Structure formats: structure tokens, C-alpha cells
Amino acid sequence: VSAADGQLLREIEVLDESGARRALQIPVERPLTISINGRELVTLMTLGARSELLVLGYLRNQRIIDSVKDIKSIRIDWATGSAAVSLRPTANEIKADARHQVGTACGLGTVFGDLMMRVDAAPLPSAGTARLSSAALLRILEIMREYDAIHRAAGSVHGCALFHGADLLASIEDVSRHNGVDIITGWMLLHGVAGADKTLFTTGRLTGEMVMKAAHNGVSIMVSRNGVTSMGYDLGVKLGMTLFGRAAKSRYLCYTGAERFDRESDISG
Amino acid sequence: VSAADGQLLREIEVLDESGARRALQIPVERPLTISINGRELVTLMTLGARSELLVLGYLRNQRIIDSVKDIKSIRIDWATGSAAVSLRPTANEIKADARHQVGTACGLGTVFGDLMMRVDAAPLPSAGTARLSSAALLRILEIMREYDAIHRAAGSVHGCALFHGADLLASIEDVSRHNGVDIITGWMLLHGVAGADKTLFTTGRLTGEMVMKAAHNGVSIMVSRNGVTSMGYDLGVKLGMTLFGRAAKSRYLCYTGAERFDRESDISG
């Protein structure tokens, strides 16, 4: 556990069922209030390991920004739990305003009402461009078993990671599955990484909003350790995405989009 | 599976890792937009099994209403996914307005920024009033294993239940752990059931907001199948609550408030 990780975990003393005292690690979440040009937008709870990327990805996935160029600066101040975002005077001020309104209708951990209306806005790569082999999928599951350090130490967090074939590009753990995909989005945006030939792994459920966030970033293949909801499934089908769930060890289910999946092929194929 | 349950689940066809086709049940979530006196407040995603209770509990836990008396009517229309709430002309209109503002700062699946400030507002029963025996706790875990019908059939949902000792009073499954506790809250409000001597079970994590919702309804004992976050733990300690986590089969951890817990006592004791 590095110095940075030390701030993500805290040790408490608990009693187990035998009455014995035990030390237990728990994740340390912090409120982070994002404001745009001085106007409060939202408060997210986060471990805070990648707060700039979280802010970047959140703004992109809420469609307030299109690229990093839309941002003049992001200042994180943990003393006040604030992320002050300064946007360039492009069309984004208006977008931020519009978003501020939509923000009033946000559910807790859920999708926005206009989710299904946005479907047509996300063109995804053809099955020719984005493919995944069963060997790569199994390797992804193997890698992710080793990358859930906080989950294993403390539980109560979600993991999210981006792969190119079986190559891990970026991974993160945070207190919500939404933060995870937002941080990966921020990483893609910052590094100019396109989603077309990538696979997004999450430990969280494939709900409508999670699937939408992947699609919005051009990612057409998602793998979840968890399940799918009807809205996530419907969106995946409508967008022509490839969704895997219940994926752990050597087991998985392909919910939709099997045309992108090469079974029993070589990892390089 | 009853007729009502049939609307909560849907069957899709998936491919498993051996390439075999399989029928799979998935939970069917629907958007439900709550408006108060004609003004849009929030959109929740829900299975819709207990939507009136969900609306009632949501409004109570967001502190827009104090009791059912504050409500003139709730009209649910699934064709438009809307819950039209009419409030009585008491002080609540103002509260609803205030809440509408705070609503813009809501996190996805997370707590509100002013959570810690509300702590002093929730007086909880003494350890003398609210107690739980280890026998009752084990019985609760046994009962909850049998009550997660949708979870077993389809996964991707959270369960929540209210107990008096080892007696199950109400239970619900929905797509978010927040909906679960909101629905149980609505049930308590509708039936005039006080939280003082009750235990709230949830399959979800004990985050700050979950702990706060229990406390707001006078419930001082919580049991989670999952873990705790630092904010949930801190709130529990500060409020003098009793929190159990990682509770399944015959195992559990007591995070805080062991003074309310009677180990190895009789279920009636």
C-alpha cells in the first residue's frame, strides 16, 4: 500500500461473530463539489485518487464539455472539498446552464429521463473494427482479479478499467461505479484515446446510464462482473453494442452483440 | 412468480461461456419522474412494485414532508412514468422549493453535501430501548436469504427489510439500495410504525446517506450484507447507532454500537 493508497483506506476496529476484536480496512470517501465558472453543479462522493480525471470525465459524460480544450482550468481543493472548473467562453457556458437544469432531475445512482432520446447521438464502430476474442476476455478477467486492491482490502468500492484487446490501459477503483467510468472517460479524454477498439470492464451493473456512458465515448464492448438491467440491455441492443455480464474466473454471459465476439480464437487474432 | 412479479422481470436470451443459448431473467426498471404541485423534482429508476411507497419515502427522506398528512394525493401514471404529488398548503411548499435547489447538488448514488450538518437533527433511542440479540440477528439473515426472490432470479437488485426483533415487518427489492430504504420508509410512514425498536436490513453498502436515512426514521440498528464506507461509519459512531456488515449465513461484523447487541442470548430475550 503506497502513501497515496493510505489516504484511500482507513483502519477501524470491529467485533466479529465470535466476539473477537478485528482490524478492518474501510474506504475513505470524500465529498467533492464541482462548480463551473463559480456556479455549483453537483456534489460527488469519491475516494479522491483521480479527482481531476473524475471531474473531466463527469463533465464529458454529462455533455457539458466535448474535449479537454473546453476547459481552462480545474482546481481541486480538498480542504473545502471543491473542484472549481473554469470553462473557455465557447458554447459550453450554455451547455453548462442547460445541464444545470437537467441536473435537478437526476436520480440517485440512476439514469436521466432523456436517456433513451440520446441514443441516436452515439455512432458506434462496426463489428469489423471492434472485436474481442474469448482468450482476450478470459485474460481481462484474470487481470481484473489482480487489480481490485481496495476491494479486496476494504470492499465497498467498484472497479473500472479500459482494455485494448487483453492489454490493460487504465484502471481505477472508487466508491461508485459511475465514478469509475467517469474517471476512465477523463483518462481517455486527457490522453486522446479513442474508444472504438477498446473494451470497458466494470465490477458494477450494466444499467442504462453505464451503457450510455460507454457508448458516448465510442466504446462498443463492455464486460461486467455483475448483471444487466432491462434498460442497459435495451440500450445495448439498440446501439449495437456487445455486452458481457456475470464475468468472473472463466465464466461469463454474452447478453447481446455476439457478432463482435470470437470464441476460442487466439489472443492476438 | 406471481402476475405482479412478471412485470418486474423479463426474459432475454444470452450465450454462456460454452456458447450455449440460455434464457435469463433481468429486472425491468422504469423511470419515474416525481413532480410536486406541478413542478418536476427528480427522476428515479425503479422496478415499480411499490411506487407510491417509494414516492412517500423519498419525499420524507429528502425532508420535503414530515408525515403522510403533508400529502393531498400521489398519482402514478406508468404511461408517462410520472408521479404527480399534491402537497397540502402547509410549510412544505417552501421546503419543496428549498429541496429543489439542493437537488441540483445531488450526486449519483451518493450523499448530499450538507449530510454531516444534519447529524444533530436526528435523536435516536437509547441502547436500553433498541436492542438486538445474536439469535435474532442470525434469524434475520436466515429470513433474508429466502426473501431475495428477484435477486436470485435476475440479480442486479438490492433488498431492504424492516424487522422487529426477528419478526419481518416489510421487505422490498428494487434496482437501487436507496429505493429500498425509501420504500421501507414510505411503509413506516403510511402505517405509523416507529423506528425506535426496529432493525433495518439492506443488501447494499452502509454509506453516509443510507445510515442517515435510517437515523432520520429513528432506526438505530442496521444490518448490511455488504460493507461500510468511512462516512457511513463516522455517522453511525456520531449518532450512536449499531451497524452490522458483511452479514450472511452465520457470519457478521459489528462495526459500532456493540452495547445494543446481546450475544448468544435467546431470541425472545
Image (cartoon, coloured by chain):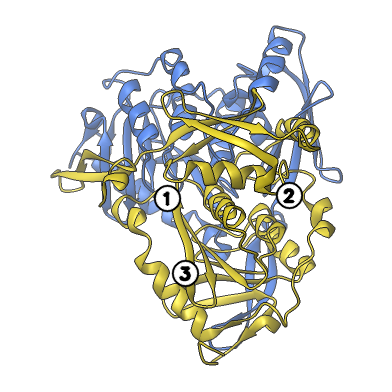
Chain colours: A blue, B yellow
State the residue position of label 3. Answer: B168
Q: Secondary structure at mark 1?
A: loop
Query: How far separated are the C-alphas under marks 2 and 3?
Result: 35 Å
Q: Foreground residue, A28 or A266?
A: A28
Looking at the image, can residue A49 be seen? no
Q: Residue at x 36, y 53 (%)?
A: A142
- Chain letter of the residue carrying label 3: B
**Left of A248 or right of it: where is B74?**
right
State the residue position of label 2. Answer: A30
State the residue position of label 1. Answer: B157
Mark 1: amino acid: Val
Mark 2: amino acid: Arg
- Residue A85's spot in the image, x, y percent? 77, 25
Q: Is residue A204 above or below residue A238?
A: below
Query: Quick one: quadrant of the C terminus of chain A?
Result: top left
Q: Callout 3 environment at 10 Å: few (<14), some (14 to 19), or many (20+)?
A: some
* C-beta proximity under 8 Å, tags 2 and 3: no
Query: How far separated are the C-alphas under marks 1 and 3?
Result: 20 Å
Q: How many marks?
A: 3
- Residue A134's spot in the image, x, y percent? 24, 42
- Chain letter of the residue carrying label 1: B
- Residue B21's spot in the image, x, y percent? 14, 42
Query: How far separated are the C-alphas under marks 1 and 2?
Result: 26 Å
